[in-house]
Amino acid sequence: MAKIDTILQDLIIANRILAKEEVVDAYGHVSIRHPDNPKHFFLARSLAPDLVERDDIVEHGLDGQPVRDETRALYLERFIHAAIYEARPDVQAVVHAHAEDVLPFGIAQATPLRPVIHSGSFIGAHVPVWDIADKFGDTDLLVRNIDHGRDLARSLAGNNVALMRGHGFASAGRSLIEVVRISVYLPRNARALQRATQLGGEIKSLSKGEIAARAAGYSPYSSETWRAWQYWATKAGCAQLLTRPDEKHEHKH
Amino acid sequence: MAKIDTILQDLIIANRILAKEEVVDAYGHVSIRHPDNPKHFFLARSLAPDLVERDDIVEHGLDGQPVRDETRALYLERFIHAAIYEARPDVQAVVHAHAEDVLPFGIAQATPLRPVIHSGSFIGAHVPVWDIADKFGDTDLLVRNIDHGRDLARSLAGNNVALMRGHGFASAGRSLIEVVRISVYLPRNARALQRATQLGGEIKSLSKGEIAARAAGYSPYSSETWRAWQYWATKAGCAQLLTRPDEKHEHKH
Amino acid sequence: MAKIDTILQDLIIANRILAKEEVVDAYGHVSIRHPDNPKHFFLARSLAPDLVERDDIVEHGLDGQPVRDETRALYLERFIHAAIYEARPDVQAVVHAHAEDVLPFGIAQATPLRPVIHSGSFIGAHVPVWDIADKFGDTDLLVRNIDHGRDLARSLAGNNVALMRGHGFASAGRSLIEVVRISVYLPRNARALQRATQLGGEIKSLSKGEIAARAAGYSPYSSETWRAWQYWATKAGCAQLLTRPDEKHEHKH
Amino acid sequence: MAKIDTILQDLIIANRILAKEEVVDAYGHVSIRHPDNPKHFFLARSLAPDLVERDDIVEHGLDGQPVRDETRALYLERFIHAAIYEARPDVQAVVHAHAEDVLPFGIAQATPLRPVIHSGSFIGAHVPVWDIADKFGDTDLLVRNIDHGRDLARSLAGNNVALMRGHGFASAGRSLIEVVRISVYLPRNARALQRATQLGGEIKSLSKGEIAARAAGYSPYSSETWRAWQYWATKAGCAQLLTRPDEKHEHKH
């Protein structure tokens, strides 16, 4: 399978996983940077992620526009992806979504979202909250152009996740598998923190050292990481698209 | 497809979507105004929305009665629809439902329901709470006649949603797609507000300017709106009923 | 269909509905009084409700014992049913279950469970909390004999529902459809009250007059009641067992 | 069926049940001690529990290593199982999982997790919270070697469940059915306690006498216990793997 075909097939899997895990619904999207051309990235046309297939994927440039003639409607908020790829050469994949249980932390800012469970460590020690109104005043809250996108990317800075007030979040990863994993565990970590806060008393968050230890040990194609990707794809009904041979037939040597 | 057939098929889809998204269960209903006769509207006979088919839809007048001989049982609360269509010429579609997570805001009135997430903006800046007991004293809480319906419509006034204390809500839209969207995101917005309230501190609601900016940009048949309708219909298992060609085959020019 | 066959088939439907609606899981049970012999009732043998079929149903007497030779294991807590039928000649059907969202109200007794939504009205104005420890001290909390059952029935008195501290609830209805409806809406009413309490401020419960008005209007075989039964049976995958012709073919006169 | 085959088939069922009941997802695992060799135990290779089949199960020693040549990746945290079997000769089966609703009690330690519902009694009167940082400082929180495992086992001591701060829990049972049951009801008990705490006022936990009475009456192959196992296996789609004849054909004498 050609490298580009593998990547696009992985992107379809990522779309299906994010839908099945309720990170996205009709809205939200996931992209991957072009492996050979860092100034391009792949993102579906305007379509619910669960319905995305191969011919729905469109190659975009860092201005957020399609690099070839395109007559189909595109995601209004494709500038989230463009601006993050522009600002962050280390980032290979981006998710934007509205996962419900993350939203309260962008609305009630008394409780900063932070990792409290080990699987949430990849959101990073600091999760900034970006408010589009700070710079742009009253808008429809959508990241409709590259200026909006760049302002969001500035807020994200070197972090992995930025909350978007009253809207959702953007997450950035070093690989597609990593950004999906961050995005799936972000709501879970949010729920654990929400409920721990309700119980009262001191909250034991992950220490900076723990967050660093986990980040250091992370490899996107380790057994542990693949295990989740394989499981999620199976749950989402697209195990047949997996681009790596089943571990049942994979040996260590 | 004749215009009236398209509308009735859309109404069936709306019934299925509202059931799948758990806005309605055995109870709750959705109607659409007759496109050629504003004094009539279409609403199913007394049946769980998920089970509604073409021959279950009954044409009603603004008195809440069927316009033709009808021997089957009708929804007791059809007067909600009749009275709102009577009072609001701008309204083309109405939903009444008991979506669980909206209920607390009609019971505990210390926290007014208001938009806190962008997808919740369409509920509007003000969501009145109607209490049937204020005018009618002890009842079974059902909107059983046109007087009840008119009192609810007065409380709704020019807003998009009225909560009904201890019962549910009524929502009114400029199109069927809009009223379904309002009704699906209303519980989500309620949950986000509920959880943000639990986190404590200041709640950042959408500003009036943001709500207005979103309302101004709304178009019931935009790519973004259709994307959700198509996705929800697919989830609800009735994609084959969609009355608009798949965007895969739709070009902009 | 003979009357007894109809009743047993309805009882199977009730078992499936309660499982699908997550009122029961592997545990919990539903019974119906014998229509011709008020000293007998029908209840499954020890089996998860979702798996109950016709030949799993056992006829019991008011002592909680099977009226015919029975070699299969029976529900340990069949005495809940026996004692309620014994004490309450008006009761035709009984449910015992552990529905999760009802449990907090038996554990934290500061907030009495009461109807706050119209569909919850049938739990009645007063929901006593029975604590087996009050009379029997340290037990395994199970209603293992007729003495336990009678103590619970005394606590239930003339009400429709009794909570069982740290365990679940028992509900009693004038018909099978009614007791299923009470049991399905009990957790929903509990959740609405729980969340309303979190929002703070005054809670508007249903008034006694409203509860009475709803009880007065209730008929187990009305269109509205049947609508839910038909819908729930369809969801539970047993619409084919419905013992009443589809309303599509039912005319009022 | 040979004893060892029965045990391995039960272990597959346990994997599927824990996945279906959302105790585990891609992560988490369940093991059983070798019936003839208490120094060995059976645990899957590194694979999501829902996907585990017969040839994925690997025999491990009490050092946490496979007892035969093994080229496939193993669970990093297999030392949880090894250390508990080493320290606790009474334990026949172990689960490690991250069930979401248990997590808050390891993070916010003001509210000790304890049995508040009868089905939660098997977690035992005392549930210690183990914090890997107490002894090992900043780690990635994983139980990566036998020293980590032994420290956890010391914290577990003679109890049935230990919470792992910011990570999950480990549970230990006298049989596979028991440890699955503990693990399924642990999150339910946690939710009931969480919600009861929100309601405020005095919390009525199970008394020590009640916990003891329930433990005394427990038998892993009673009708009541089997009923749940059979139901869960059916829900998880693997009823055909059940190793005991259906009770429909089982007579008491």
Image (cartoon, coloured by chain):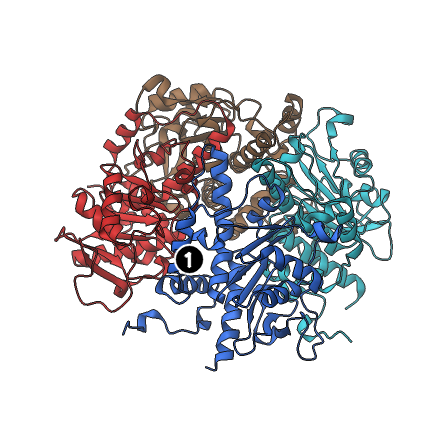
Chain colours: A blue, B cyan, C brown, D red
Residue drawn at x 40%, y 61% as measured from the top left: A218
Location of residue C82 with respect to A4 vertically, above or below:
above
Q: Is residue C81 left or right of residue B129?
A: left
Q: Chain of mark 1?
A: A
Residue nearest the viewer, comparing C174 with B240: B240
Instruction: Tell me where residue C193 sits by quadrant.
Output: top right
Which residue in the rendered view is the most extreme toward the bottom? A2
Instruction: Tell me where residue B240 sits by quadrant.
Output: bottom right
Where is residue C96 drawn, in percent x and y?
43, 33
Which residue in the rendered view is the most extreme toward the top? C135
Location of residue B16 with respect to B29 vertically, above or below:
below
State the quadrant of the C terminus of chain C. Answer: top right
Where is residue A174 drawn, in percent x and y?
49, 65
| Total numbered labels placed on residues in the image | 1
Where is residue D6 drawn, in percent x and y?
21, 56
Location of residue A241 with respect to C35 vertically, above or below:
below
Which residue in the rendered view is the most extreme toward the left? D36
Helix, strand or loop at label 1? It is: helix
Q: Is residue C134 left or right of residue A110?
A: left
Q: Which residue is mark 1?
A: A215
Instruction: Tell me where residue D51 sits by quadrant.
Output: bottom left
Q: Is residue C92 visible?
A: no
Residue nearest the viewer, comparing A110 with D221: A110
What amino acid does circle 1 point to? Ala
